[in-house]
Structures are given as C-alpha cells and as structure tokens.
Image: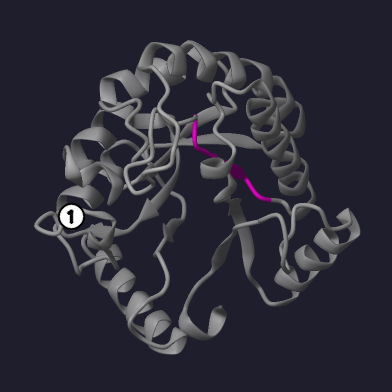
Amino acid sequence: TRKYGFDGIEICPDEGGETSLNQPLSRWKEIASAAEASGIEIRSLACGLWWKYNLVSPEEKIRTKAKDVAKKLIEIAQIVGAKSVLVIPGYVNVPWDPQAEIVPYDVAMERAKEALLELAPLAQSARVILGIENVWNKFLLSPLEFRDFVDGINNPYVKVHFDTGNVLICGYPEQWIAILKERITTVHVKDFKVAVGTIDGFCLPLEGDVNWPQVMRALKSVGYDDYLIAEFIPPYRHSWETLLVNLSSNLDCIMKMV
C-alpha cells in the first residue's frame, strides 16, 4: 500500500476467496476502481494454480484447465489494466511435492510450445503480455534455452517474467538478465539462501545470496525500467506490518544501487 511506499501491486487470483477467478467480472471492475482511488497500479497478475493445473500434464483435461486459467487471467488483466500475466509453462516435476507427476522433458517442451502458440493470439488481442516465469519446475533450466523458447513462440506478447531468487540455486541472475535482455517484461525480486538449498531458503531481498549490485546493473544495461515486484512465501516470521516495513526499506536500498 501507499502507506509503506509501494506504488503498485501484483494480484494473485485463486479458485476462491476475495480474488476468485470465478467471481463476476463486475467485481474485478470494483477492485480496479478501488486500486485507482488508492493511487495503486495493478501491474500484473500471478497465480498459484499453475502447480495444480500443469500446462504440460499427461492428462488432456488438466492441460485444458490450465489453458482455461490462462484465458481467464488474460480477461481479468484486461479489466483491471494489468500489463502482464505470470505463466508457468508447465513442469517436468515439482521438487517439493512427492505426489507430483513426472513429465518427460521433450514432451513438456512440445506441449508448452503448443499451449503458448494457442494462447499468444488471445493475449495479443487483449494487449496483455504473457510473462513466462523461471521457476523450480525442472524445465527450461538455462537462460539460453529460455531465450530460445520465447523466441520460438515469436510473438511480442510472450515474454519473460524473471525471478531473481529462483535462478540462484543453479546460476546467476545477472547472467540470465544479460542473456534474456529485452525479453524481460516483469521482474520478481526475492532472495535465496544457497546454503539452505530448499524452498525454505527463499527470503526477502538483501537477506540471501543474490548479488544485488550486479543484478541492478544488469537490469539497467538491458533497459529494464519497470516495477520490481517483491514476492515472498508465507507464512513469514514477522507480522504483516513488520514485513512490509522491512521489505520497503530493503527495496529502497536496492534501488539506490544504480
């Protein structure tokens, strides 16, 4: 909120609750109006349902549901004025879920391309960018592969939603930024403690091992001039108010590095 120095927000719709995908579109118009009245821009939409509905699942009905989620997010983004929608391009496996299905890598690649080629024209028509995120999905594991995947879709409304913390377990975010360049449309800033090595290692910016001066120089060098969106994984050890105060302070420090 403005109280803590934030100018925008990323909304995460789900299947229920106050930001339900299934609520009337008129409710989303109300949310957009409330944000505007508060001086807050709804910059992007994210969604945890990509883990439930794998875009490259062996089951066609699950793949169809995942595409339906994407289509709904595009529709909502158009209503609330969000520039982009985060998309997880499917997973080969989910490291923290022993029950998750395992999809052959080459099959995942084929299905992911097929899905994005289908969704891209809808996104372009709505003027909403699909931001493909680098996540712990055991898929698209290098910046070169990620770059070529996006280029293969060959649509200006399919770009990269880059996450600084997600890449640290196997690479360097500043190198990914330098390779992905203008393909980056949205940036998640979170940190990661490499010594922890599991999902419990994610933390607020400046609390982990991301080299923030190099990351900020890399973003500047590729011409990125948009929001830095803080993502954190609840539950967190502090109250919400303490979290927001700390987060705002840390982001102020990072933005002064350039």
38 or 169, nearer to the observer: 169
Q: Quick check: 57 left or right of 188?
A: right
Q: Quadrant of residue 13?
A: bottom right
Q: Quadrant of residue 114?
A: top right
Q: Quick check: 74 left or right of 143?
A: right
Q: Residue at x 49, y 36 (%)?
A: 88
Callout 1 crowding tier (Cα within 10 Å): few <14, some 14–19, many ≥20: many
Residue 252 picture location, percent across and down: 32, 72
| Stretch of the chain drawn in magenta | 82-89
User: Relative to 2, does residue 82 appear above or below in the rendering?
Assistant: above
Check residue 85 for magenta coloring. yes
Query: On the image, numbered disc 1 is attached to which residue?
Result: 210
203 or 92, nearer to the observer: 92
Residue 176 picture location, percent across and down: 25, 34
SS at mark 1 in the image: loop
Q: Residue furthest front?
A: 99
Identify the image quadrant of the C terminus: bottom left
Q: Residue at x 71, y 70 (%)?
A: 35
Q: Quadrant of residue 40?
A: bottom right
Q: Residue at x 14, y 59 (%)?
A: 196
Identify the image quadrant of the N terminus: bottom right
* Res. 128 visible in picture: yes
* Res. 151 visible in picture: no
User: Relative to 192, does residue 1 appear above or below in the rendering?
Assistant: below
Q: Quick check: 218 left or right of 55?
A: left
Check residue 131 for magenta coloring. no
Q: Residue at x 56, y 65 (%)?
A: 8
